[in-house]
Image (cartoon, rainbow, N blue to C red):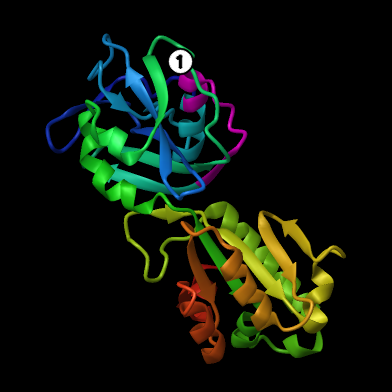
Amino acid sequence: MAAKDGDGWAQCDRGHRHWGVHGASGLLAVHHDTAGTPHVLMQKRSMWSHHGGTWGLPGGALDSHEDAVSGALREAREEAALNGEGLRVQGVYVDDHGGWSFQTVIAEASGLLEAAPANDESTDLRWLTPDEILARNLHPGFAETWPEISRVLAPVLVILDTANIVGARAEHGWWKDRAGAAAKLISEVGALGAGGVRALPGGPAALTRWFPRFAMVVEGAARDVASVSGVSVISGVSVVAAPGSGDDAIVRAVREAAPWEHVLVVTADRGLRGRVTELGAEVTGPRWLLSQL
C-alpha cells in the first residue's frame, strides 16, 4: 500500500480507458450565496493531461488504501491548494462504469475559498454558477454526470425528535433514565454522522452515501445531556436543549434553516409532522433512523 500505487490506466466494461488502477475520486466543493445560488469550484485541466483544456473537478487516481473522501481531499490539496478547512462532506456520488468508477465527493464550503493551481495538472480554478458551468467546455465524464449531481448540491439537515425516537425504540427501562437513553442515541447518531447514511426518505437517490447535519432536540429530563448554554456538539451532532416544548424547538429549528437546505424531521408525532410540513420540511418516522444505526 504505497503512495501513488493507483497511478496507471484501467479499462472499464464500456471499453473506455480511465486513469486510476483502483478507480478515482474528485472534490466538488459548493458554496451557496445569500440568494441560494450554488457556486462550484471548477478546474481547467492542463493541455497535456487527459481531456486537456476541459473543465472538471480537482481529482485523480485513488491509492489502494484510500477511500473516496480521503482521496478527493488529497487531490484537492495537491491540485488546488485546499487543505480541507472550511469544507464539510455532504455525500458521495458514484459513476460506475463497470470495473472502474469515479466517485464525486460533494462538500459544503463555508465561503468562496481561495484556491489556485498547486501543480502542473491545472491552469485555472474558478468558482462558477451552474449557468457558467454549462457555458464551459466540460470534461466528458463530468458533463455526463453533472445533470444528476446538480440536483443534490443542497446540504441536508436532519432534525431529530429525540424523545419520540427513544420512545419508539422501546428499550426496557428507558423511561427511568431518559437522559441516559438520550445520551446513548446521541452517541449512536454521532457514529452515523461520521459514517454517513445509505438513503434519505423522499430524497433523490443519486448519492450512495449521505452525510447530513444532525440536530437532536432534547427536552424535560433529557435536557441534562446538552451543555449548560443550551447547544453543544457531540461527535458532529448538534444537541439542542428545548427551554420548553420540544415540538416548538423543532419547529423553530426548521424555520431557522437556510432556505436552500433540504430539511428532514424524524418524528412519529402527527401534530408535529403537520407543523413542519407546512414550513416545507420533509418528514419520516423513527423506524428510518433506527434502521440506519
Name the residue located 32 percent from the left edge and 47 percent from the top edge: 149
Name the residue located 40 percent from the left edge and 49 percent from the top edge: 153
Is residue 64 toward the left or the right of residue 99 in the image? right
Q: Magenta span has 144? A: no
Relative image position of residue 226 (x, y in whole percent): 80, 67
283 shown above or below 28: below
Relative image position of residue 107 (x, y in whole percent): 49, 42
Farthest-out residue, front: 35
Between 252 and 125, the one lying in front of the other is 252
Between 27 and 17, the one lying in front of the other is 27
Which quarter of the rendered picture does the C terminus lie within?
bottom right
Relative image position of residue 12 (x, y in whole percent): 19, 34
242 shown above or below 75: below
Amino acid type shown at disc 1: Pro
Magenta highlight range? 76-89
Q: Secondary structure at mark 1?
A: loop
Count residues near mark 1 (Cα–Cα under 10 Å), then give few for <14, some for 14-19, many for 20+. Answer: many
97 shown above or below 115: below
Is residue 197 toward the left or the right of residue 219 in the image? left
Name the residue located 58 percent from the left edge and 32 percent from the top edge: 84
User: Looking at the image, can residue 260 be seen?
Assistant: yes
Relative image position of residue 18 (x, y in whole percent): 24, 27
User: Looking at the image, can residue 185 be seen?
Assistant: no
Residue pointed to by mark 1: 117
Name the residue located 69 percent from the left edge and 81 percent from the top edge: 246
Between 188 and 136, the one lying in front of the other is 136
